[in-house]
Amino acid sequence: MNLTLKVWRQKDAKSKGKLESYPVSGISEHASFLEMMDVLNEQLINEGKEPVAFDHDCREGICGMCSLYINGEAHGPDRGVTTCQLHMRMFKDGDTIYIEPFRSKAFPVLKDLIVDRGSFERIQQAGGFISVNTSGNTQDANSLPIAKPMADKAMDAATCIGCGACVATCKNSSAMLFVAAKVSQYSYLPQGQVERKERVLNMVDQMDKEGFGNCTNTGACEVECPKGISLEFIARMNKEYSSASVKAEN
Amino acid sequence: MSKGFSKSSVGRKVLMALSGFFLMFFLVQHLAINLISVFSADSFNAASEFMGTNPLVQFALQPVLFFGIIFHLAMGIYLELKNRAARPIKYAMNKPSENASWVSRNMVITGIMILLFVGLHMVHFFFPTINAHYITHEHLDAYEMVANKMANPVYFGIYILAFIFLALHLLHGFQSAFQSVGFNHNKYTPIIKKLSYLYAIAVPLGYAIVAVYHFTNACCSSASCSL
């Protein structure tokens, strides 16, 4: 396949970026999108140019590291996949492909296609955990029975890999699908009950401080999420938040 | 109650939904009175007289309604501005229609069109009624006022257009309000979505039928009309 790539190039966080055009040729339709990016970078290095910086790690669709807004969609035109699982057969020979970083005030661009998703880390630090004694006397897992439907729901929420596609695709740059998945995951489990109220209040508070937009229930996040996190969790978070707010003492 | 509720993204979303529910309830009540005008001019005048003079309606319900409208409008615009600021650099290539409906993405546009209509509607009916009841103390024939306004093809066209925008706004708003207050259920959410379509089409259609009735009435009674 021969393609024209329009790639966002930006020297560093402070510089102004712009789209640059690069032709690439001889791309296999069986190649993954990131392998195609590797071919582009080899080509750029051979030409003595700066390679394109982009995030990637496991390349198995489970780490949440890869990003990219490809031809107007987070993780590209395929559904239920991350960019590393996107294959070039989704494109046609001669296509022009726009490759941009995830855009949000809360995801500042660091270089080229790499954005700082530290805002997600700070939201997690605000409450996305349970406080347990890990000093060597951990309970046996079977001593705490959990109903299968609850365990399944918690697992569904826990499949969120925190890639940020929900923020990137949302017209409001809202992080509610991510935060909802993290809040819901613990709310279904007995271990999560102790800090249940503070968790949702603190995580939503941190989300708002980071500068994400507000959810308007368009549902775009659910469609673009590589892990298929459901909008149901956002409704659950809304309920958790309202309930925790009503019961809060200050 | 947490102090930060009304300042948080989730709290504001819940308040938008609650004010939306209230306005959707009001739309049904307003439509019920409008429909009376199709059946009986006298009954419509009596209903209008009641709504225009009853102290409970005038001094308790009406201020709540105004607060609801202004809150929903002001918060909607404020949130839209905040949401736009959350993405300072736009995408060079974006395909929003691939994952979200037009109505869900353009609530602010349909909302502003409804707002403009509400302004015109107040000039047409609300202010003359207030003027007659509290300032000039003249008798006002509400039915005649409606019939006169709807006889004007331009006003009639604007009203029909406004009802279309209302339907578009409600198509998303009805179901979205349930989601915002935290109601999402495997069994009931599909029913709510169907109810959303029913409400969003039936209510504006009801308003449109009343407008069409008065427009055709006026048209048929005028000499120049061939209907």
Image (tube, coloured by chain):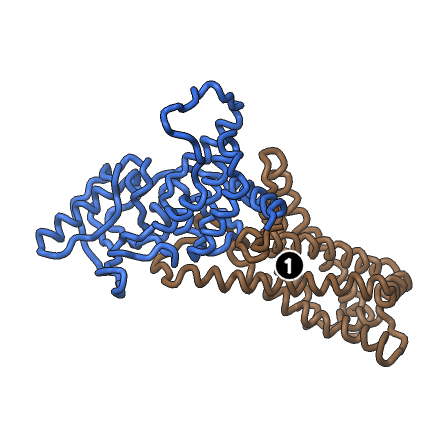
The location of residue A217, given as percent across then percent down, is 53, 49
Residue at numbered disc 1? B166
Subunit under mark 1:
B
Quarter assignment of residue B8? bottom right
Q: Which residue is drawn at 37% across and 39% down?
A: A161
Chain depicted in blue = A
Mark 1 element type: helix
The location of residue A236, given as percent across then percent down, is 55, 40
Residue A89 in sight: no
The location of residue B212, given as percent across then percent down, is 74, 62
Q: Nearer the viewer, residue A91 or A58?
A: A58
Q: Which residue is drawn at 43% across and 59% down?
A: B86
Q: Nearer the viewer, residue A94 or A181?
A: A181
Crowd class of label 1 (few under 14; some 14 to 19; many from 20; radius 10 Å): many
Q: Nearer the viewer, residue A176 or A102?
A: A176
Q: Nearer the viewer, residue A191 or B85?
A: A191
Q: How many labels does the image show?
A: 1
Q: Is residue A207 above or below residue A58?
A: below
The location of residue A105, given as percent across then percent down, is 38, 59
Q: In this view, does A63 lie above or below B148?
A: above
Quarter assignment of residue B107? bottom right
Taking the image as shown, residue B18 lies to the left or right of residue B212, namely left
Visual hue assigned to chain B: brown
Q: In this view, does A89 lie above or below B104?
A: above
> In the rendered view of the protein, which quadrant contains the C terminus of chain B?
bottom right
Q: Residue at x 41, y 35 (%)?
A: A159
